[in-house]
Image: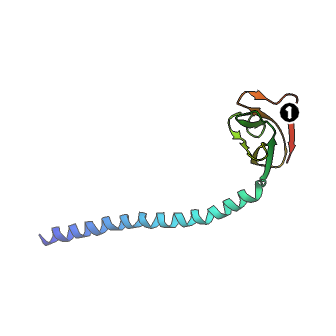
Amino acid sequence: MAKTTATKATTKKAAAKPAAAPKAAPKAAPAKKAAAKPAAKAAATSSAPKKVTVEFIADCPLASTVSIAGTFNNWAVDVDMLKKDKKSGLWTTKIALVPGDYEYKFVCDGKNWDAGDNKIKHV
């Protein structure tokens, strides 16, 4: 009977060693990922152009809502809404854009587009 008890104890120790080895491996892996993340973020930050905040102003005194649609938002009418300044009556919004040229139009009440050619904003 003593041999059986010793065998069970040996089996438990052998089972414990493999369990300890996988626990050590995941601890090392996050350290490598953590070291790689700052380098990846630095590379992504330095290669991406900086966005510039651009203010758009519309004079639409009779409108109840005003939005701006353009090449920067895929001409979506309901994405970039302007807010009305109670003192001046002008509608304004600020949008962060990557430097470049953008075409746009103001849309009043969701259906009335600016007449004429598209406006162009150089950022």
Q: Name the residue located 67 percent from the left edge and 60 percent from the top edge.
A: 41
Callout 1 environment at 10 Å: few (<14), some (14 to 19), or many (20+)?
some
In-image side of 110 versus 122 (left or right): left
In-image side of 15 versus 40 (left or right): left
Q: Quadrant of the N terminus?
A: bottom left
Q: Name the residue located 74 percent from the left edge and 33 percent from the top edge.
A: 63
Between 95 and 11, the residue placed more toward the observer is 95
Q: Name the residue located 68 percent from the left edge and 38 percent from the top edge.
A: 79
Image coordinates for residue 114, horizontal then vertical, percent: 82, 30
Indicate the quadrant where residue 5 lies. bottom left
Per the image, label 1 sits on a secondary structure element best described as: loop
Image coordinates for residue 102, horizontal then vertical, percent: 83, 40
Q: State the scheme by which the image is colored.
A: rainbow
Compared to residue 74, the image places residue 99 above or below, namely below
Image coordinates for residue 82, horizontal then vertical, percent: 72, 42
Compared to residue 4, the image places residue 91 above or below, namely above
Where does label 1 land, which residue? 118
Instruction: Name which residue type carries label 1.
Output: Asn
